[in-house]
Image (cartoon, rainbow, N blue to C red):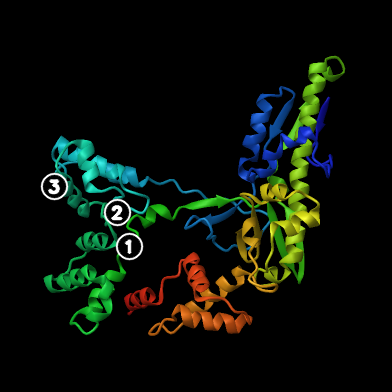
Amino acid sequence: MKLRTSTNISAKHKLSTTMRSWLHILQTDLEGLKETLDEAKKENPFIEVQSGSEVKSVAKSKSKQEYQKNSVSNEIEALSISKKSLYDRLSEQIEPPLFPTKKSQDIAYEIINNIDDNGYLKNEISKIATKLNIKEEDVQKVRKRFAHLEPSGVGAVDLYESFLFQLNDFDLSSKLYGTCTKIINDFENLQSYQNEEGFLDAIKIIRKLKNPPALEYKEQTVAIIPDIFITNQNGEIKVSLNNSYYPDIIIDTNGLEDEFDFVKKKVKEATNLVEALELRKETLTKIALMLVEYQYDFFQGGDIKPLKLDDLSSELDRHHSTISRAISNKYLSCDRGIFSLKSFFSTAVDEETSNSAIKSYIKEIVKNEDRKKPLSDNKILALVNEKFNISIGRRTITKYRIAENISSSSERKKQYLLEIV
């Protein structure tokens, strides 16, 4: 008997005891689904798992919550980049004449082991010295040579030292070099140097410096695999699953199920596995439809409205934990970009306003603020309260600003100064 069962078994509304053991199928992301099924295959000799055609979307891994905007299409090919790691790039440069002795090379390798993903030295010099049983001065002497390695600026203890390291890449006059170092060493008081001779030239150089120094090794292209596609066609919103990515489960007993209880048991387990896979599809489809209903304004270009997991669990007659599993590590692709399902569940500030809407508004007004007079949190608070007709505190505004990686008004003023042409 051969039975292809990718879509013809409807999922049950209530989970049986057996089905509960397959809840991890609901929780796993789409990319890991075949791997999860392959693990089940190892325990059941009567099933085969065949891959579907892979439909992915491309996004940059700048952060866990930041995705490159793409148009939704039926087939988007994933990109991959093969490049040396930061460790490999640095290690290949640990050789004479910069590191002429075995001791200097051993110290250099230990420094590399303690450099974080941003390119900064994450451990104190003293800890490295203690581990190698050498003097701190020896470690410091070797570390200073990292100013001559690529990528430039790596191995520094902080942003300012990294900038000083990177100045070595420029052919500067002694006077301009001195102005640059003076500004970098007193960066907190950047404004006080505006009237100094050579200030604009120095700022032009500083603007070219990388922050963080290992930036090129962080911005790698990765594939985001959406479970759900939502398209807006002439004002009509349509929902579809990434069905082509789902594996097919084939049950093949060669007629033995009628003769052996062991085979019957394994066929039952395989059928439960198929039902679990269909439960995943059914649940995600219902969640997608509910998201369109609750967040209709968002898919038409508006803001995300307040929505809790309990809202969906009651509507779908599913347990809160089932909904939580279903949205975990799942993504949705629409004409506004690629978003995690979790991003559609936001806390309500009041009945009509979500914290996501306020955060989006804060980002918008900061983006368009007067760069000579950046908005303070109190001024942002006044604008928010007026815009949404609500009353929240300044601390809440500060918390939202920090959550969106927006610097304080004083820090933004310094950043704007660096953008002087």
The relative height of residue 66 versus residue 371 in the rendered view (above or below) is: above
Residues at discs 1 and 2 in contact (Cβ within 8 Å) = yes
Q: Residue at x 40, y 85 (%)?
A: 373
Q: Position of residue 267 (x, y in %)?
A: 80, 25
The relative height of residue 242 versus residue 71 in the rendered view (above or below) is: above
Q: Residue at x 54, y 56 (%)?
A: 59
Q: Residue at x 71, y 24 (%)?
A: 44
Disc 1/disc 3 C-alpha distance (Å)? 27 Å
The residue under label 1 is 210
Horizontal side, residue 403 vs residue 329: left or right: left
Disc 3 versus disc 2: nearer the observer: 3
Q: Residue at x 37, y 45 (%)?
A: 84
- Mark 1 or mark 3: which comes first in sequence? 3
Q: Position of residue 81 (x, y in %)?
A: 46, 49
Q: Position of residue 413 (x, y in %)?
A: 36, 78
- Mark 1 or mark 2: which comes first in sequence? 2
- Where is the C terminus found, in terms of image quarters? bottom left
Q: Is residue 253 in sight in this rendering?
A: no
Q: Which mark is residue 377?
A: none
The residue under label 2 is 151
Disc 3/disc 2 C-alpha distance (Å)? 24 Å
Look at the numbered disc 2 and give the secondary structure of its residue: loop
The residue under label 3 is 137
Q: Is residue 129 in sight in this rendering?
A: yes
Horizontal side, residue 400 vs residue 5: left or right: left
Closer to the camera in the image, 310 or 66: 310
Horizontal side, residue 282 vs residue 405: left or right: right
Please tell me in which quadrant of the rendered image residue 416 appears: bottom left
